[in-house]
Amino acid sequence: MAGKLNGQRCYLAGPIDHAEDDGIGWRTTMSAWLSERGVMALDPTNKRTSNTIFNEIGDEQKNLGQLRELGRFHELRDAMKPIVLADLRMVEVSDFLIVYLDPSVQMCGTWEELFVGLRQHKPVLVVVKGGKKKLNFWMFGRINPDFVFDSFEDVQRYLEGVDDETIRADSSRWIFFDYNTDPEPLSIHNRNY
């Protein structure tokens, strides 16, 4: 039987341009784990879009870096706009986010994606390299510490509990739509006002 997470979409936010492996490793592992539970991973290093030119990894990232080094800032902006658009759109259509924060890595897009998810009242599950105690003070004013984890294994255990309902999902963040039932159509004549 499918669990609560089946059919959900999860955006995987975290550093890319300053990450040693372009942020691919943890995303690949989490994508496979999520897929086993029927969750579609929305991965900015492996965009499934029809109109994104760049994935901002590997040689494409080197090309972006060259544009910056050469001072070709308008070309860099033109290259980055569709990347930013696609990434933020994936945040918008996601049901929840897993965010990896590495305090030693310079990040920009990750922060915007995290705050967009919070403003949209989505579950934003944060894994902090070095543990919860490394999270900056500001974030404790923005996110429930129960949604901050010391490792990916910890976030997986949490999600397993949500999936099999041994952990009660925070109803102020988690919304589960049942697409398998056919609701009765509403009619103007059967509404109770």
Image (spheres, helix red, strand yellow):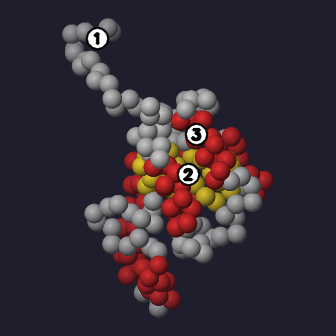
What residue did someone put label 1 on?
191
| Picture quarter with the N terminus | top left
Report how far apart the C-alphas of labels 3 and 2 lie in the structure: 14 Å
| Crowd band around label 3 with a 10 angstrom C-alpha radius: few (<14), some (14–19), many (20+) | some
SS under mark 1: loop
* Within-10-Å neighbours for mark 2: few <14, some 14–19, many 20+: many
Residue designated by label 2: 98
Q: What residue type is labelled 2?
A: Ile
The x, y position of residue 143, in whole percent, is 65, 44
Seen in the picture, residue 13 relative to 61 is either above or below; the reply is above
Residue picked out by circle 3: 160
Could you tell me if the residues under marks 1 and 3 are in contact, i.e. CB atoms within 8 Å? no
Q: How busy is the neighbourhood of tag 1: few (under 14 within 10 Å), some, or many (20 plus)?
A: few
Depth order, front residue of 190/49: 49
Query: Residue 18 in the image: x percent, y percent?
Result: 59, 74
Q: Which amino acid does label 3 sit on?
A: Glu
Say which quarter of the image contains residue 44.
bottom left
**Cα–Cα gap, marks 1 and 3:** 39 Å
Position of residue 142 relative to residue 15, above or below, is above
Dot 2 lies on which element? Answer: strand
Residue at x 42% of width, y 49% of height: 40
Relative horizontal placement of residue 8, taking residue 98 as reference (left or right): left
Q: Position of residue 63 (x, y in %)?
A: 43, 84
Could you tell me the amino acid type at mark 1? Arg
| Residue found 47% across the figure and 84% down from its top | 62
